[in-house]
Image (cartoon, helix red, strand yellow):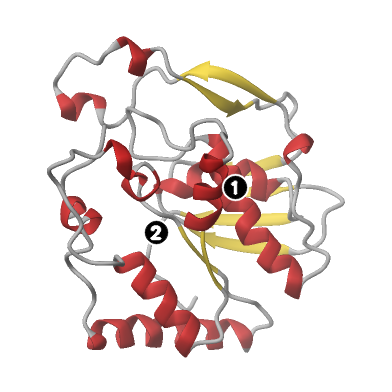
Amino acid sequence: LFYNKEGSVRSFQNADLFSPAELQTIRDNLTGRAEWLRKRGAHLYLLVVPAKNRVYGEFYPSGIRKVGSIGRAEQTVEYLRETTTVPVEFALEDLLAAKTNGAALLYFRQDTHWTDHGAFLGYRKLMRRIHRDLPAAIPAEKSDFQWEYRPEGGGDLTPLARVALGKSATDARYETLVRPQPLPFAYLLQHPFVNHTVRNGRPLKAFVLYDSFGVSMIPFLASTFGEVKYLRRHDFNEI
């Protein structure tokens, strides 16, 4: 299943690119925030997560064809890499490589979002870049966590589809992170939109602004940094 609201179909077709003025606004916002953080001794990193239809586009309706060679995500990543010094990581390359190598499903069939395995690949992409600047931020290995296969059990697209799903969809199983008890890190605050984790013995602190794709990255980040504060919002206030 694929989401078809908010311009997602035209996004898949690469039909609507940003204008030069819009790209400049994105650049100015990002560089301004990076400079504000730099003056306070912090680094800014941006991870761009592709929509499911960019990774599993072969399952999109065959009548919907692409009209351009790149989409907004690729356009923005390329532009920011050319015009700024802010590290911008795009998870698409790693996800496609894992898919080609026969990895477990990276996005849920009945949901918009990536699986825990997909999120781990995004985490690794981001952390490899951070590690280049901050050697103490050591990316976790997949073997550092416990995994098991579980059925999906429905997703955010199921009620929108309003159709009976076939057996191949309902029987799909996904590589899922096992949350051990006790956790290797502590939640000082746990809320759908605000989280705060601490792990003893780990250096460095991080502040993470994220959307719904970032939820499944929290256990990986929490296991890496000594302290992380997470805020689920898109804007940035100079507090």
- Closer to viewer: mark 1 or mark 2: 1
Residue nearer the viewer, 52 or 239 = 52
Drawn side of residue 151 relative to residue 75, left or right: right
Could you say where residue 80 lies in the image, as x and y percent from the top left?
44, 81
Q: Which residue carries the number 2 mark?
A: 233
Residue displayed at 25% across by 82% down: 22
Look at label 2 and name its amino acid: Arg
Q: Badge 1 local density, few (<14 within 10 Å), some, or many (20+)?
A: many
Residue displayed at 16% across by 57% down: 10
Distance of mark 1 from mark 2, alpha carbons? 22 Å
Q: Kindly state the secondary structure of the residue where label 2 is placed.
A: loop
Q: Quadrant of residue 69?
A: bottom left
Could you say where residue 133 lies in the image, as x and y percent from the top left?
74, 75
Residue 101 in view: yes
Could you say where residue 123 lies in the image, as x and y percent from the top left?
61, 52
As displayed, is residue 165 above or below residue 112? above
Residue nearer the viewer, 32 or 196 = 32
Q: Earlier in the sequence, mark 1 or mark 2?
A: 1
Q: Kindly state the secondary structure of the residue where label 1 is placed.
A: helix
| Label placed on residue 121 | 1
Residue nearer the viewer, 31 or 233 = 31
| Label placed on residue 14 | none
Look at label 1 and name its amino acid: Leu
Drawn side of residue 77 relative to residue 58, left or right: right
